[in-house]
Amino acid sequence: MAGYEEILGANAPIKAWISGVPVEHEAQNQLRNVAMLPFIHSHIAVMPDVHFGIGATVGSVIPTKGAIIPAAVGVDIGCGIMAVRTSLNANDLPDSLARLRGAIERNVPHGNGPRGNHREQPASVDTAYRDSGLQERYEAIIDKHPKASAKAQTAQLATLGGGNHFIEVCLDEADRVWVMLHSGSRGSGNRIGQYFIERARDELLRRELGYHVPDKDLAFFMEGEPLFADYIDAVGWAQDYARLNREVMMERTLRALRDNLPKFKLEKHAVNCHHNYVARERHFGADVYVTRKGAVRAGEGELGIIPGSMGAKSFIVRGKGNVDSFCTCSHGAGRAMSRTEAKRRFTLADHRAATEGVECRKDAGVIDETPMAYKDIDAVMAAQSDLIEVVHTLRQVVCVKGERLRELSSRNQPIN
Protein backbone atom coordinates (compact mmCIF):
# COMPACT_ATOMS: atom_id res chain seq x y z
CA MET A 1 0.00 0.00 0.00
CA ALA A 2 1.30 3.44 -0.85
CA GLY A 3 1.88 6.03 1.82
CA TYR A 4 3.40 9.44 2.17
CA GLU A 5 7.02 10.47 2.55
CA GLU A 6 8.09 13.59 4.42
CA ILE A 7 10.02 16.31 2.61
CA LEU A 8 12.43 17.70 5.18
CA GLY A 9 13.78 21.19 5.74
CA ALA A 10 10.52 23.06 6.35
CA ASN A 11 8.75 24.62 9.34
CA ALA A 12 5.45 22.82 8.83
CA PRO A 13 5.50 19.12 7.87
CA ILE A 14 5.26 18.29 4.15
CA LYS A 15 3.58 14.94 3.51
CA ALA A 16 4.16 13.78 -0.06
CA TRP A 17 2.66 10.85 -1.97
CA ILE A 18 5.62 10.56 -4.35
CA SER A 19 6.85 6.97 -4.06
CA GLY A 20 8.34 6.00 -7.43
CA VAL A 21 7.64 9.43 -8.94
CA PRO A 22 10.39 12.02 -9.59
CA VAL A 23 10.04 15.49 -8.06
CA GLU A 24 12.16 18.45 -9.23
CA HIS A 25 14.38 20.25 -6.72
CA GLU A 26 12.66 23.52 -7.70
CA ALA A 27 9.29 22.05 -6.71
CA GLN A 28 10.65 20.81 -3.38
CA ASN A 29 12.08 24.23 -2.61
CA GLN A 30 8.74 25.83 -3.48
CA LEU A 31 6.99 23.50 -1.06
CA ARG A 32 9.44 24.42 1.69
CA ASN A 33 8.77 28.11 1.05
CA VAL A 34 5.03 27.63 1.51
CA ALA A 35 5.61 25.57 4.64
CA MET A 36 7.47 28.52 6.22
CA LEU A 37 4.30 30.57 6.50
CA PRO A 38 2.93 30.69 10.07
CA PHE A 39 -0.73 30.30 9.10
CA ILE A 40 -0.32 26.84 7.52
CA HIS A 41 -2.64 24.48 9.39
CA SER A 42 -1.17 21.11 10.42
CA HIS A 43 0.87 20.33 7.27
CA ILE A 44 1.02 20.55 3.48
CA ALA A 45 -0.02 17.56 1.36
CA VAL A 46 1.69 16.84 -1.95
CA MET A 47 0.24 14.72 -4.74
CA PRO A 48 2.30 12.47 -7.07
CA ASP A 49 1.74 14.72 -10.12
CA VAL A 50 3.56 17.56 -8.31
CA HIS A 51 5.68 19.99 -10.34
CA PHE A 52 6.94 23.57 -10.22
CA GLY A 53 4.35 26.34 -10.62
CA ILE A 54 3.85 30.04 -10.00
CA GLY A 55 3.52 30.96 -6.33
CA ALA A 56 2.90 27.43 -5.18
CA THR A 57 3.58 23.98 -6.53
CA VAL A 58 1.07 22.35 -8.85
CA GLY A 59 -0.17 19.19 -7.18
CA SER A 60 -0.21 20.62 -3.65
CA VAL A 61 -2.83 21.03 -0.93
CA ILE A 62 -2.39 24.11 1.26
CA PRO A 63 -4.62 24.47 4.35
CA THR A 64 -4.52 27.95 5.84
CA LYS A 65 -6.04 29.39 8.99
CA GLY A 66 -6.94 33.09 8.98
CA ALA A 67 -5.30 33.83 5.63
CA ILE A 68 -5.44 32.94 1.94
CA ILE A 69 -2.80 33.09 -0.82
CA PRO A 70 -4.27 34.19 -4.20
CA ALA A 71 -1.25 32.98 -6.23
CA ALA A 72 -1.63 29.53 -4.69
CA VAL A 73 -5.11 29.33 -6.19
CA GLY A 74 -3.66 30.73 -9.43
CA VAL A 75 -5.29 32.38 -12.42
CA ASP A 76 -7.12 29.42 -13.98
CA ILE A 77 -9.57 29.54 -11.09
CA GLY A 78 -12.01 26.65 -10.94
CA CYS A 79 -10.24 24.69 -13.66
CA GLY A 80 -11.44 21.12 -13.57
CA ILE A 81 -12.86 18.16 -15.45
CA MET A 82 -16.30 16.84 -16.26
CA ALA A 83 -17.14 13.36 -17.54
CA VAL A 84 -20.37 11.62 -18.51
CA ARG A 85 -21.07 8.04 -19.60
CA THR A 86 -23.36 7.38 -22.53
CA SER A 87 -25.34 4.30 -23.53
CA LEU A 88 -23.18 3.98 -26.66
CA ASN A 89 -20.43 1.41 -27.04
CA ALA A 90 -17.42 1.06 -29.31
CA ASN A 91 -19.44 -0.68 -32.03
CA ASP A 92 -21.57 2.46 -32.39
CA LEU A 93 -18.55 4.53 -33.45
CA PRO A 94 -17.56 4.85 -37.13
CA ASP A 95 -14.24 3.49 -38.38
CA SER A 96 -13.04 7.05 -39.00
CA LEU A 97 -13.57 9.51 -36.18
CA ALA A 98 -12.34 12.56 -38.09
CA ARG A 99 -15.86 13.73 -38.85
CA LEU A 100 -16.87 13.47 -35.20
CA ARG A 101 -13.82 15.40 -34.09
CA GLY A 102 -14.60 18.11 -36.66
CA ALA A 103 -18.20 18.35 -35.42
CA ILE A 104 -17.03 18.86 -31.83
CA GLU A 105 -14.53 21.50 -32.93
CA ARG A 106 -17.28 23.38 -34.79
CA ASN A 107 -19.67 23.25 -31.82
CA VAL A 108 -17.13 24.30 -29.18
CA PRO A 109 -14.75 27.23 -29.83
CA HIS A 110 -11.23 26.26 -28.81
CA GLY A 111 -7.90 28.03 -28.47
CA ASN A 112 -6.77 31.14 -26.63
CA GLY A 113 -7.40 34.70 -27.76
CA PRO A 114 -10.43 36.09 -29.63
CA ARG A 115 -10.64 33.14 -32.03
CA GLY A 116 -11.41 30.95 -29.03
CA ASN A 117 -14.60 32.91 -28.29
CA HIS A 118 -18.09 32.54 -29.70
CA ARG A 119 -18.60 34.71 -32.77
CA GLU A 120 -22.33 34.55 -32.11
CA GLN A 121 -23.49 33.46 -28.68
CA PRO A 122 -25.69 30.34 -28.95
CA ALA A 123 -29.13 30.96 -27.45
CA SER A 124 -28.82 28.01 -25.07
CA VAL A 125 -25.53 29.35 -23.70
CA ASP A 126 -26.98 32.83 -23.27
CA THR A 127 -29.97 31.38 -21.40
CA ALA A 128 -27.75 29.29 -19.13
CA TYR A 129 -25.72 32.34 -18.15
CA ARG A 130 -28.78 34.52 -17.59
CA ASP A 131 -30.48 31.90 -15.42
CA SER A 132 -27.36 31.21 -13.35
CA GLY A 133 -27.33 34.55 -11.51
CA LEU A 134 -23.66 34.93 -12.36
CA GLN A 135 -24.10 38.26 -14.13
CA GLU A 136 -25.51 40.03 -11.06
CA ARG A 137 -22.74 38.63 -8.88
CA TYR A 138 -20.09 39.64 -11.40
CA GLU A 139 -21.40 43.20 -11.59
CA ALA A 140 -21.25 43.48 -7.79
CA ILE A 141 -17.59 42.36 -7.83
CA ILE A 142 -16.61 44.72 -10.67
CA ASP A 143 -18.41 47.66 -9.07
CA LYS A 144 -15.94 47.37 -6.19
CA HIS A 145 -12.94 46.33 -8.31
CA PRO A 146 -13.24 47.70 -11.87
CA LYS A 147 -9.69 46.60 -12.76
CA ALA A 148 -10.73 42.97 -12.25
CA SER A 149 -13.09 43.21 -15.20
CA ALA A 150 -12.76 41.11 -18.36
CA LYS A 151 -14.76 41.75 -21.50
CA ALA A 152 -15.50 38.19 -22.59
CA GLN A 153 -17.30 36.48 -19.71
CA THR A 154 -20.34 35.75 -21.88
CA ALA A 155 -18.51 35.17 -25.19
CA GLN A 156 -16.26 32.62 -23.50
CA LEU A 157 -18.93 30.55 -21.78
CA ALA A 158 -18.98 27.06 -23.33
CA THR A 159 -15.49 27.51 -24.81
CA LEU A 160 -12.45 25.31 -24.24
CA GLY A 161 -9.36 27.51 -24.22
CA GLY A 162 -5.91 26.21 -25.09
CA GLY A 163 -2.86 24.56 -23.57
CA ASN A 164 -3.72 21.39 -21.69
CA HIS A 165 -7.49 21.92 -21.90
CA PHE A 166 -9.21 19.22 -23.92
CA ILE A 167 -12.40 17.47 -24.99
CA GLU A 168 -12.19 13.69 -25.37
CA VAL A 169 -14.34 10.80 -26.42
CA CYS A 170 -13.19 7.74 -24.48
CA LEU A 171 -13.93 4.03 -24.08
CA ASP A 172 -13.92 2.33 -20.69
CA GLU A 173 -12.93 -1.24 -19.81
CA ALA A 174 -16.32 -2.48 -21.09
CA ASP A 175 -16.04 -0.43 -24.34
CA ARG A 176 -18.75 2.01 -23.20
CA VAL A 177 -18.45 5.53 -24.61
CA TRP A 178 -17.65 8.43 -22.30
CA VAL A 179 -17.22 12.14 -22.98
CA MET A 180 -14.70 14.02 -20.86
CA LEU A 181 -13.60 17.65 -20.95
CA HIS A 182 -11.16 19.89 -19.12
CA SER A 183 -11.49 23.67 -18.78
CA GLY A 184 -11.94 26.46 -16.26
CA SER A 185 -13.08 30.06 -15.82
CA ARG A 186 -11.36 31.31 -18.99
CA GLY A 187 -10.42 34.99 -19.34
CA SER A 188 -12.73 36.27 -16.61
CA GLY A 189 -11.23 34.02 -13.96
CA ASN A 190 -7.75 34.76 -15.26
CA ARG A 191 -8.26 38.50 -14.85
CA ILE A 192 -9.73 38.09 -11.36
CA GLY A 193 -6.75 35.96 -10.39
CA GLN A 194 -4.20 38.40 -11.79
CA TYR A 195 -5.87 41.40 -10.18
CA PHE A 196 -6.05 39.94 -6.67
CA ILE A 197 -2.53 38.52 -6.88
CA GLU A 198 -1.33 42.06 -7.64
CA ARG A 199 -3.39 43.48 -4.76
CA ALA A 200 -1.95 40.87 -2.36
CA ARG A 201 1.59 41.83 -3.40
CA ASP A 202 0.77 45.48 -2.74
CA GLU A 203 -0.59 44.59 0.69
CA LEU A 204 2.53 42.57 1.49
CA LEU A 205 4.71 45.66 0.98
CA ARG A 206 2.62 47.51 3.58
CA ARG A 207 2.57 44.80 6.22
CA GLU A 208 4.73 44.84 9.31
CA LEU A 209 5.38 41.16 9.91
CA GLY A 210 7.44 39.37 12.49
CA TYR A 211 8.43 36.71 9.97
CA HIS A 212 9.91 36.41 6.49
CA VAL A 213 7.81 35.72 3.39
CA PRO A 214 10.28 33.99 1.04
CA ASP A 215 8.49 34.70 -2.24
CA LYS A 216 6.34 37.67 -3.31
CA ASP A 217 3.97 35.17 -4.96
CA LEU A 218 3.12 33.96 -1.45
CA ALA A 219 1.55 37.33 -0.66
CA PHE A 220 -1.72 36.85 1.20
CA PHE A 221 -4.91 38.41 2.50
CA MET A 222 -5.78 38.05 6.17
CA GLU A 223 -9.23 37.15 7.40
CA GLY A 224 -11.11 40.23 8.56
CA GLU A 225 -9.58 42.49 5.92
CA PRO A 226 -11.94 43.88 3.24
CA LEU A 227 -9.80 42.43 0.44
CA PHE A 228 -10.02 38.98 2.02
CA ALA A 229 -13.82 39.00 1.82
CA ASP A 230 -13.77 40.50 -1.66
CA TYR A 231 -11.38 37.83 -2.89
CA ILE A 232 -13.52 35.05 -1.43
CA ASP A 233 -16.53 36.47 -3.30
CA ALA A 234 -14.58 36.82 -6.55
CA VAL A 235 -12.94 33.40 -6.44
CA GLY A 236 -16.31 31.85 -5.59
CA TRP A 237 -17.82 33.52 -8.66
CA ALA A 238 -15.00 32.24 -10.88
CA GLN A 239 -15.37 28.69 -9.55
CA ASP A 240 -19.11 28.72 -10.23
CA TYR A 241 -18.50 30.17 -13.72
CA ALA A 242 -15.98 27.41 -14.42
CA ARG A 243 -18.43 24.70 -13.39
CA LEU A 244 -21.17 26.19 -15.58
CA ASN A 245 -18.68 26.54 -18.44
CA ARG A 246 -18.02 22.80 -18.33
CA GLU A 247 -21.74 21.99 -18.11
CA VAL A 248 -22.78 24.02 -21.15
CA MET A 249 -19.68 22.94 -23.06
CA MET A 250 -20.65 19.33 -22.38
CA GLU A 251 -24.12 20.02 -23.79
CA ARG A 252 -22.56 21.45 -26.96
CA THR A 253 -20.24 18.44 -27.25
CA LEU A 254 -23.06 15.94 -26.75
CA ARG A 255 -25.02 17.72 -29.47
CA ALA A 256 -22.15 17.00 -31.87
CA LEU A 257 -22.32 13.33 -30.89
CA ARG A 258 -26.09 13.22 -31.35
CA ASP A 259 -25.73 14.70 -34.85
CA ASN A 260 -23.20 12.08 -35.91
CA LEU A 261 -23.86 8.88 -33.94
CA PRO A 262 -26.82 6.58 -33.23
CA LYS A 263 -29.35 7.71 -30.62
CA PHE A 264 -28.15 7.39 -27.05
CA LYS A 265 -28.98 8.18 -23.46
CA LEU A 266 -26.80 9.52 -20.67
CA GLU A 267 -26.08 7.18 -17.79
CA LYS A 268 -26.12 8.28 -14.17
CA HIS A 269 -22.34 8.28 -14.03
CA ALA A 270 -21.40 11.96 -14.27
CA VAL A 271 -18.62 13.82 -12.49
CA ASN A 272 -17.80 17.56 -12.48
CA CYS A 273 -14.89 18.46 -10.20
CA HIS A 274 -12.58 21.43 -9.75
CA HIS A 275 -8.84 20.97 -9.34
CA ASN A 276 -7.70 24.62 -9.00
CA TYR A 277 -9.77 26.12 -6.21
CA VAL A 278 -10.22 27.05 -2.57
CA ALA A 279 -12.90 25.75 -0.21
CA ARG A 280 -13.82 26.11 3.46
CA GLU A 281 -13.44 22.69 5.11
CA ARG A 282 -12.84 21.16 8.51
CA HIS A 283 -9.61 19.25 9.09
CA PHE A 284 -7.72 18.23 12.22
CA GLY A 285 -10.15 19.98 14.53
CA ALA A 286 -10.32 23.36 12.78
CA ASP A 287 -12.27 25.13 10.06
CA VAL A 288 -9.70 26.19 7.46
CA TYR A 289 -9.39 27.35 3.87
CA VAL A 290 -8.08 24.49 1.74
CA THR A 291 -6.38 25.50 -1.50
CA ARG A 292 -6.05 22.66 -3.96
CA LYS A 293 -3.67 23.74 -6.70
CA GLY A 294 -3.79 20.98 -9.27
CA ALA A 295 -5.49 18.53 -6.90
CA VAL A 296 -8.94 16.92 -6.62
CA ARG A 297 -11.05 16.42 -3.51
CA ALA A 298 -11.28 12.70 -2.71
CA GLY A 299 -13.52 12.43 0.33
CA GLU A 300 -14.75 8.99 1.27
CA GLY A 301 -17.03 7.74 -1.50
CA GLU A 302 -16.65 10.89 -3.63
CA LEU A 303 -16.05 10.42 -7.36
CA GLY A 304 -13.23 12.24 -9.11
CA ILE A 305 -11.37 12.24 -12.42
CA ILE A 306 -7.64 11.76 -13.01
CA PRO A 307 -6.81 12.22 -16.71
CA GLY A 308 -3.65 11.04 -18.40
CA SER A 309 -2.05 12.74 -21.38
CA MET A 310 -3.27 12.72 -25.01
CA GLY A 311 -2.33 9.09 -25.60
CA ALA A 312 -2.46 7.67 -22.09
CA LYS A 313 -5.16 6.23 -19.84
CA SER A 314 -7.52 8.28 -17.69
CA PHE A 315 -9.38 7.21 -14.57
CA ILE A 316 -12.70 7.69 -12.83
CA VAL A 317 -11.84 7.24 -9.16
CA ARG A 318 -13.57 7.02 -5.80
CA GLY A 319 -12.02 8.75 -2.82
CA LYS A 320 -11.00 6.91 0.33
CA GLY A 321 -11.17 10.00 2.56
CA ASN A 322 -7.52 9.86 3.60
CA VAL A 323 -7.24 12.48 6.35
CA ASP A 324 -3.50 13.10 5.96
CA SER A 325 -4.07 14.13 2.33
CA PHE A 326 -6.92 16.43 3.41
CA CYS A 327 -9.16 14.02 1.44
CA THR A 328 -7.35 14.73 -1.85
CA CYS A 329 -5.84 12.97 -4.86
CA SER A 330 -3.86 14.04 -7.93
CA HIS A 331 -5.47 15.91 -10.83
CA GLY A 332 -3.56 14.18 -13.61
CA ALA A 333 -0.17 12.79 -14.55
CA GLY A 334 1.73 16.06 -14.05
CA ARG A 335 4.35 17.46 -16.39
CA ALA A 336 7.74 15.75 -16.52
CA MET A 337 9.36 18.68 -18.34
CA SER A 338 8.72 22.21 -19.56
CA ARG A 339 6.87 22.96 -22.77
CA THR A 340 10.07 24.34 -24.26
CA GLU A 341 12.00 21.17 -23.38
CA ALA A 342 9.25 18.97 -24.88
CA LYS A 343 9.46 20.88 -28.17
CA ARG A 344 13.23 20.54 -28.19
CA ARG A 345 13.27 16.86 -27.37
CA PHE A 346 10.41 15.34 -29.37
CA THR A 347 9.62 15.21 -33.09
CA LEU A 348 6.34 15.02 -34.95
CA ALA A 349 7.14 11.38 -35.66
CA ASP A 350 7.47 10.75 -31.90
CA HIS A 351 4.14 12.46 -31.27
CA ARG A 352 2.33 10.57 -34.04
CA ALA A 353 3.61 7.27 -32.70
CA ALA A 354 2.58 8.14 -29.14
CA THR A 355 -0.95 9.10 -30.22
CA GLU A 356 -1.51 6.26 -32.69
CA GLY A 357 -5.14 5.19 -32.62
CA VAL A 358 -6.34 8.54 -31.28
CA GLU A 359 -8.12 10.99 -33.60
CA CYS A 360 -6.36 14.20 -32.59
CA ARG A 361 -4.04 16.95 -33.74
CA LYS A 362 -0.66 15.61 -34.81
CA ASP A 363 1.00 18.90 -35.76
CA ALA A 364 3.80 20.98 -34.25
CA GLY A 365 1.31 23.13 -32.31
CA VAL A 366 0.70 20.35 -29.77
CA ILE A 367 4.18 18.88 -29.38
CA ASP A 368 4.35 20.45 -25.90
CA GLU A 369 1.30 18.34 -24.97
CA THR A 370 2.68 15.06 -26.33
CA PRO A 371 2.33 12.12 -23.89
CA MET A 372 6.08 11.88 -23.27
CA ALA A 373 6.06 15.40 -21.75
CA TYR A 374 4.08 14.01 -18.80
CA LYS A 375 4.87 11.65 -15.97
CA ASP A 376 3.99 7.95 -16.20
CA ILE A 377 0.32 7.85 -15.22
CA ASP A 378 0.64 4.28 -13.91
CA ALA A 379 3.38 5.38 -11.49
CA VAL A 380 1.27 8.36 -10.42
CA MET A 381 -1.71 6.10 -9.71
CA ALA A 382 0.39 3.55 -7.81
CA ALA A 383 1.77 6.28 -5.54
CA GLN A 384 -1.72 7.25 -4.34
CA SER A 385 -3.40 3.87 -3.91
CA ASP A 386 -4.25 4.78 -0.31
CA LEU A 387 -6.05 7.93 -1.48
CA ILE A 388 -8.39 6.53 -4.15
CA GLU A 389 -9.67 3.39 -5.81
CA VAL A 390 -10.16 3.09 -9.57
CA VAL A 391 -13.79 2.78 -10.67
CA HIS A 392 -13.26 3.00 -14.45
CA THR A 393 -10.23 3.09 -16.73
CA LEU A 394 -10.71 5.14 -19.89
CA ARG A 395 -8.74 5.31 -23.13
CA GLN A 396 -9.10 8.19 -25.57
CA VAL A 397 -10.26 7.68 -29.15
CA VAL A 398 -10.89 11.38 -29.94
CA CYS A 399 -9.03 14.35 -28.45
CA VAL A 400 -9.72 18.03 -29.22
CA LYS A 401 -7.17 20.65 -28.19
CA GLY A 402 -6.91 24.37 -28.91
CA GLU A 403 -3.99 26.52 -29.98
CA ARG A 404 -1.95 28.34 -27.37
CA LEU A 405 -1.92 32.11 -27.68
CA ARG A 406 1.79 32.32 -27.04
CA GLU A 407 4.57 29.99 -26.06
CA LEU A 408 5.62 29.90 -22.41
CA SER A 409 7.95 27.64 -20.50
CA SER A 410 6.40 25.76 -17.60
CA ARG A 411 9.06 27.45 -15.50
CA ASN A 412 7.12 30.68 -16.03
CA GLN A 413 3.53 29.58 -15.71
CA PRO A 414 1.49 27.10 -13.71
CA ILE A 415 0.17 24.08 -15.59
CA ASN A 416 -3.20 22.72 -14.51
Image (cartoon, rainbow, N blue to C red):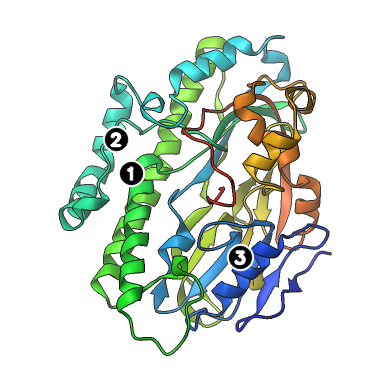
Amino acid carrying label 3: it is: Cys
- Res 327 label: 3
In the rendered image, which quarter contains the N terminus?
bottom right
Vertical relation: 24 (above or below) 183: below
Vertical relation: 46 (above or below) 12: above
Towards the viewer: 121 or 23 = 23
**Mark 2 crowdedness (10 Å alpha carbons): few <14, some 14-19, many ≥20:** some
Amino acid carrying label 1: it is: Ser
View extreme (bottom): residue: 210
The image position of residue 225, as x and y in percent, is 27, 75
The residue at 25%/46% (across/down) is 149
Q: Earlier in the sequence, mark 3 or mark 1?
A: 1
Q: Earlier in the sequence, mark 2 or mark 3?
A: 2
The residue at 53%/60% (across/down) is 292
Q: How far apart are the alpha carbons under marks 2 and 1?
A: 7 Å
The residue at 31%/64% (across/down) is 199
Amino acid carrying label 2: it is: Ala
* Residue assigned mark 2: 152
Instruction: Give the foreground label among 3 and 1.
Output: 1
* Residue assigned mark 1: 188
Q: Is residue 341 left or right of residue 193?
A: right
The image position of residue 167, as x and y in percent, is 56, 30
Q: Does residue 380 appear in this view?
A: yes
Which element is circle 1 on?
helix
Towards the viewer: 215 or 59 = 215
Q: Does residue 236 appear in this view?
A: no
- Res 356 label: none
Is there CB contact under 8 Å for labels 2 and 1?
A: yes
Q: Is residue 43 left or right of residue 384?
A: left
